[in-house]
Image (cartoon, rainbow, N blue to C red):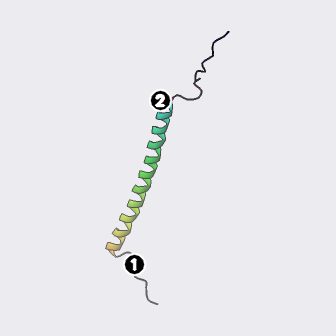
Amino acid sequence: MAGPRVAHATLKGPSVVKKLIIGMELGLAAGGLRKMHHWNKQRKTRVFYDLLERGEISVIAAEE
């Protein structure tokens, strides 16, 4: 009579360390894109207020 066989887990696909590294890389890339977007938006706001301060633009509608 043969004894019961124990099913061992077989490792398929990328390892846990590889998944962690890929996740960190994707997180850093997404964070970098978000930061660049924030810097661009901040630059546009700074330019707007500089133009407003110099009097080149106005937020009041011109009367006709």
Q: Tell us which disc is closer to us: 2 or 1.
A: 2
Q: Which residue is mark 1?
A: 59
Place of residue 61 in the rendered image (x, y in percent of width and height, measured from the top left): 43, 83
Establish if 35 lies above or below 13. Answer: below
Establish if 8 lies above or below 16. Answer: above
The residue closer to the viewer here, 46 or 3, is 3
Per the rendered image, the range of residues in magenta is: 10-16
Establish if 32 lies above or below 56. Answer: above
Mark 1 nearby-residue class (10 Å; few <14, some 14–19, many ≥20): few
**Which numbered disc, 2 or 1, marks the residue that appears first in the sequence?**
2
Q: Residue at x 57, y 24 (%)?
A: 11
Which is the main secondary structure of the residues drawn in magenta? Answer: loop
Magenta-drawn stretch contains 15 = yes
Q: Which residue is mark 2?
A: 17
The kind of residue tagged 1 is Val
Place of residue 40 in the rendered image (x, y in percent of width and height, measured from the top left): 42, 57
The residue closer to the viewer here, 46 or 23, is 23
Q: Residue at x 44, y 55 (%)?
A: 37
Element carrying mark 2: helix
Q: Residue at x 47, y 34 (%)?
A: 20
Quadrant location, the N terminus: top right
Cα–Cα gap, marks 2 and 1: 55 Å
* 8 sits to left or right of 34: right
The kind of residue tagged 2 is Val
